[in-house]
Amino acid sequence: MKTYKQINDRIESGKAVVLTAGEIMDYVDKKGLAAAAKEVDVVTTATFGPMCSSGCFLNFGHSKPKIRMSEAWVEDVLVYTGIAAVDVYLGATQLRHGDPANMYHPGEFRYGGGHVIEDLVAGKKLQLFALSYGTDCYPLRELRTYFTINDLNQAIMVNPRNCYQNYNVAVNDSDRTIYTYMGILEPERKNANYCSAGQLSPLLNDPYYDVIGVGTKVWLAGAHGHVYAEGTQHAGACERTPEGIPKGGAGTLALTGDMKQMRPEFVRGVTFRGYGVSLALGIGIPIPILNEDVLRRTCVRDRDIMAPVVDFSQDYPQNTGKVICYVSYEQLRSGQIEVEGKKIAVGSLSSYYKALRIANLLADEIRRGDFRLAEPIEPLAKDKKMKSLVTRKKPS
């Protein structure tokens, strides 16, 4: 048994043994579980991919004269102003003003909230346009200016739902091409798409949320952030494999971090033709090896993780809950799966290469003593189930 304090003391002294989730399986095979649990202090996990439920709070400071922004746009992308005078929230999936969306299907969605966030982190100069109804204390009614992230008082990423524990493999059973947030799906199961780093992914290395919880320190696109709540749609009470690995979405994390400390290569605006815009993020989370059970769960391999194959032409949009079959991440990463006797080419929306790079970058920070672990102040719920929206008539 180890404690967080003992591990942090070893980090501070430069003696911590840190391995990535990609390295730990072979290490345990070589050393044995008991010996490795005594020796290894931290296993780093990571993921990189689109995370639609993301955004940021920006504070512009006060102009002369002052304005209470009632409507505002950054690079013509609408931001939410219903907070305070010069605080706004920018959502990753917000479209640019005037974008025709899917009026001429499939829409191109060239620029939106995720791209604004990418440009902010990259240090680009962006336009702010704001309107107001005017008040005695905030008399200015219109403002147009240009700014960079360094001109802002705060640029805080606040993401309600990141790091899905597991996710669907999308196929298309219809006779026409469809355009989804899982990418373009060709008719009659000609292709399939998935989105996860599998054996590197944080919550798959901590399937029962034993060490990742509210207050856990995370590497958020290079910034040192933390888990501020369970993510929206967090649903730990799901079907699992005999080893405890969820066979569906299950857990999610709500994350926050300082955008001024982020690295541009891990914050990228994303376009999904025919669907919309999003934001791809790189996230790393350290797993403290407190005991053998924690270590054993970080030894999960792609062959052990099963993902549900779902038809996105009918069953997903109609919310039927039907699963065609399950396939392993080992099969997915081979580039081909077999579904009901048919071999299907597979593509990934996430980057295993970047996830592995993040796991190594985080491991290096910990070894240098630049990243300490934080003990959760509250666990994530294990027994919460997903609720659906019920459409009801107005009460009489």
Image (cartoon, grey):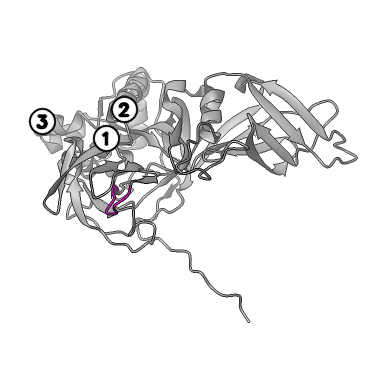
Q: Which three-letter amino acid code belongs to the residue tagged 2? A: Ala
Could you tell me which secondary element the residue under label 3 belongs to? helix
Q: Which of 282 and 126 is in front in this view?
A: 126
Residue 15: % across, % down: 29, 20
As measured in the structure, the alpha-carbon distance from the residue carrying label 3 to the one carrying label 1 is 20 Å
Amino acid of disc 1: Leu
Label 2, label 1: how many angstroms apart (C-alpha)?
8 Å
In the displayed structure image, the side of residue 89 where residue 314 appears, left or right: left
Q: Is 94 within the magenta?
A: no
Task: Give me the C-alpha separation between circle 2 and circle 3.
Answer: 22 Å
Q: Mark 2 points at which residue?
A: 359
Kindly give the residue lying farthest to the bottom in the view shown: 396
Q: How crowded is mark 1: few (under 14 residues within 10 Å), some or many (20 or more)?
A: many
| Residue 255 locus on image (x, y percent) | 47, 39
The stretch in magenta equals 169-176
Question: Which residue is disc 1 drawn over?
Answer: 200
What quarter of the picture does the C terminus occupy? bottom right
Amino acid at dot 3: Lys
> Is label 1 in a helix, a strand or a loop?
helix
If you read the primary sequence from the N terminus, does the residue marked by circle 2 or circle 3 appear first? 3
